[in-house]
Image (cartoon, rainbow, N blue to C red):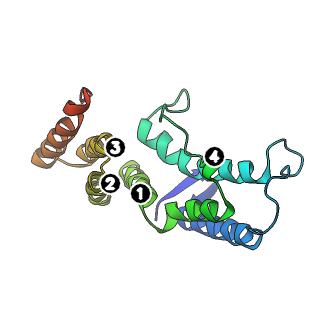
Amino acid sequence: MASVRSDGETFTVADLGAVSDAVAAVWTGAADRDWSVPAGTVEWSCLATADHAVDCVYAPAFFLASRRLDAYPDAGADLRLGARATPARLVESLAEPIHGGLPATIRKVCLGLLARLDGDSGTAATLLLEAEQEAVAWDRPYEAACIALEAAQALDGEGAALAQARAAAFLEPLGCVNPY
């Protein structure tokens, strides 16, 4: 199972699922309350704070995918729901990285990258190639190209060359250059 270690403690994907499920349960139980009031002692409303919390769940995937170490990656518009936020949509968004949809593809990419970092090239390649196909199905060619390039790093020989060629084919119509 993929995990992150920090100061001797381990945080796993299962931990993220447990935290997300617990928060979603609390938010669901409070759905009929006034979410426009300030969240405790902060200036943001409860709704804006919850929206930000969902954004924070997605942030590690973007950091891993961007390989940036110096600043937050330029991912375009942030992932907050903003004016579309409701308690129900926030609960759904919080559950998505664990249970399905495009965020599940992002989760698969994270697990693939972690597997590659752990030296498990086979698992990394499998997860990344599946995620690449899911990104294609979601009509996300840039993301599919990035995932294909990551898969190429986990593959050898012809498999790596094919993944790089797919990435180039995704990137060319976008006017992007393959960095590998």
* Precedes in sequence: disc 1 or disc 3: 1
Residue nearest the observer in this picture, 98 or 7: 98
Asked if the residue under mark 4 is in contact with the one under mark 1, i.e. CB atoms within 8 Å, the reply is no
The residue labelled by disc 2 is 138
Q: How far, Cα to Cα, is label 2 from label 3?
A: 10 Å
Residue appearing at x 30%, y 49% in the figure: 139
Using the image, determine if residue 99 lies above or below residue 80. below
Asked if the residue under mark 2 is in contact with the one under mark 1, i.e. CB atoms within 8 Å, the reply is yes
Q: How far, Cα to Cα, is label 4 from label 2?
A: 22 Å
**Which amino acid type corresponds to the residue marked 4 in the rendered image?**
Gly
Residues packed near mark 4 inside 10 Å, few (<14), some (14 to 19) or many (20 plus): few
| In front: label 1 or label 4 | 4
Quadrant occupied by the C terminus: top left
* Precedes in sequence: disc 2 or disc 3: 2
The residue labelled by disc 3 is 143
**Which amino acid type corresponds to the residue marked 2 in the rendered image?**
Trp
- Describe the element under mark 4 as helix, strand or loop: helix
| In front: label 4 or label 3 | 4
Residue nearest the observer in this picture, 155 or 45: 45
Q: How far, Cα to Cα, is label 4 from label 3?
A: 23 Å
Q: How far, Cα to Cα, is label 1 from label 2?
A: 7 Å
Residue nearest the observer in this picture, 28 or 125: 28
**Which amino acid type corresponds to the residue marked 1 in the rendered image?**
Leu
Q: How far, Cα to Cα, is label 1 from label 3?
A: 11 Å
Looking at the picture, how far across and down is residue 116, in whole percent? 35, 50
**Which amino acid type corresponds to the residue marked 3 in the rendered image?**
Glu
The residue labelled by disc 1 is 102
Q: Which mark is residue 180?
A: none
- Describe the element under mark 1 as helix, strand or loop: helix
The residue labelled by disc 4 is 82
